[in-house]
């Protein structure tokens, strides 16, 4: 199939389960959004900033960091210099193994000044947000239950709104950075919709899976099976041992938004099949 058809197949696959009505979000986006976003990362060099980490129950959830690590590994393998932006405690957890930009929240500052300084100093080639809380219209952050989590959120929104490079955001519910692109279309969902926009919005049933959709294209173009070089289960174990919780159940389990790891592994297998790295099952 051609690249547009492949993108639309990926877009359908990644919202097929539809637990949080991301098929509504998909319908609001012009088809081919995974292809368009991946093209912005094709042959990219220099710094790529990857923001992630959704605060849950005093720690961080599994959805987001797994995909961020997958993107970090894949982009680094292709010659870029990724940096993960995240807040406490995830920043401390990852600091020993990855380049980290710690995110903070200062009640006296909306984060714009520090973001502008970092952007000017580092001149990133692209910025990706994956499962990062996005500001609602009232300037606060909310979780899927409608609870105000502003006090626990480091600020990442200004890195996208002030950037002079391509910005990509991945979300799975409507309260994440990037959902401002389709805020009106998803206003009827049971969520406090985020209003922060991006250049290309990607949706998936689990945000981690959106990272895999991008890597499917990048691996195809590089003729390298990037998804086979990454283990979602091993990454879940790595994070679980360091205090992660499932964003839905709030339990320290090897799950993503209430789904067992076998669901994510099935998505990866299907993506590898769609891109020709794995033979279709008979």
Image (cartoon, helix red, strand yellow):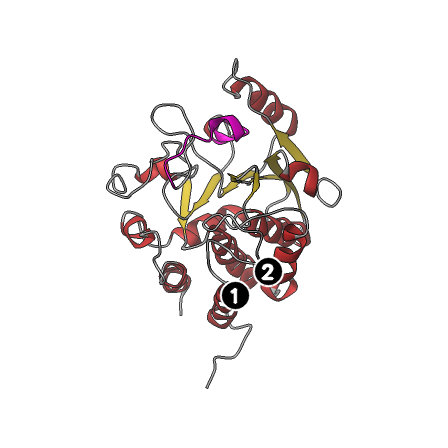
Judge from the rendering whether residue 212 lies leftward or rightward of residue 14; answer left or right. right
Spatial separation of the CA atoms under disc 2 and disc 1: 9 Å
Which residue does the image show at 46% across and 36% down from the upper left?
133
Q: Is residue 228 above or below residue 42?
A: below
Q: Is residue 138 magenta-colored?
A: no
The front one of 181 and 206 is: 206
Q: Secondary structure at mark 1?
A: helix
Residue occupying image coordinates x 55% and y 17%? 113
Residue 2, image quadrant: bottom left
Quadrant assignment for the N terminus: bottom left
Q: Nearer the viewer, residue 56 or 169?
A: 56
Mark 1 burial class by Cα count in 10 Å: few <14, some 14-19, many 20+: many
Tell me if I can see residue 47 in this picture: no
Point out the stretch of residues depicted in magenta: 145-160
Q: Position of residue 214 (x, y in %)?
A: 50, 54
In the displayed structure image, the side of residue 51 where residue 73 appears, left or right = right
Q: What secondary structure is found at the residue carrying circle 2?
A: helix
| Mark 2 or 1, closer to the camera | 2
**Where does label 1 land, which residue?**
268
> What residue is disc 2 on?
232
The furthest residue to the top: 108
Q: Residue furthest bottom?
A: 282
Residue 109 showing in the rendered view: yes
Relative vertical location of residue 201 with respect to residue 275 in this rendering, above or below:
above
């Amino acid at each position: 199939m051609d690249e547009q058809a492949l993108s639309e197949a990926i877009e359908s696959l990644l919202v097929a389960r539809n637990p949080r009505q991301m098929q509504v979000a998909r319908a609001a986006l012009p088809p081919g959004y995974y292809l368009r976003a991946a093209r912005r990362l094709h042959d990219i060099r220099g710094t790529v900033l990857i923001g992630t980490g959704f605060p849950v129950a005093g720690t961080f959830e599994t959805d987001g960091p797994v995909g961020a690590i997958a993107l970090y590994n894949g982009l680094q393998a292709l010659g870029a210099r990724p940096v993960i932006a995240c807040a406490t405690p995830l920043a401390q957890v990852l600091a020993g193994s990855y380049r980290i930009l710690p995110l903070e929240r200062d009640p006296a500052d909306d984060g714009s000044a520090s973001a502008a300084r970092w952007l000017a100093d580092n001149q990133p080639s692209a910025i990706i947000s994956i499962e990062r809380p996005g500001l609602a219209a009232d300037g606060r952050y909310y979780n899927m239950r409608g609870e105000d989590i502003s006090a626990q959120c480091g600020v990442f929104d200004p890195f996208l709104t002030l950037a002079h490079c391509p910005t990509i955001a991945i979300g799975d519910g409507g309260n994440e950075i990037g959902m401002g692109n389709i805020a009106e279309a998803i206003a009827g969902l049971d969520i406090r919709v985020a209003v922060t926009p991006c250049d290309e919005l990607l949706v998936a049933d689990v945000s981690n899976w959106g990272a895999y959709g991008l890597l499917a294209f990048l691996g195809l173009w590089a003729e390298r099976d990037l998804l086979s070089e990454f283990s979602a289960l091993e990454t879940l174990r790595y994070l679980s041992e360091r205090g992660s919780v499932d964003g839905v159940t709030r339990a320290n389990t090897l799950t993503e938004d209430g789904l067992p790891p076998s669901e994510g592994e099935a998505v990866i297998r299907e993506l590898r099949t769609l891109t020709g790295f794995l033979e279709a099952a008979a």
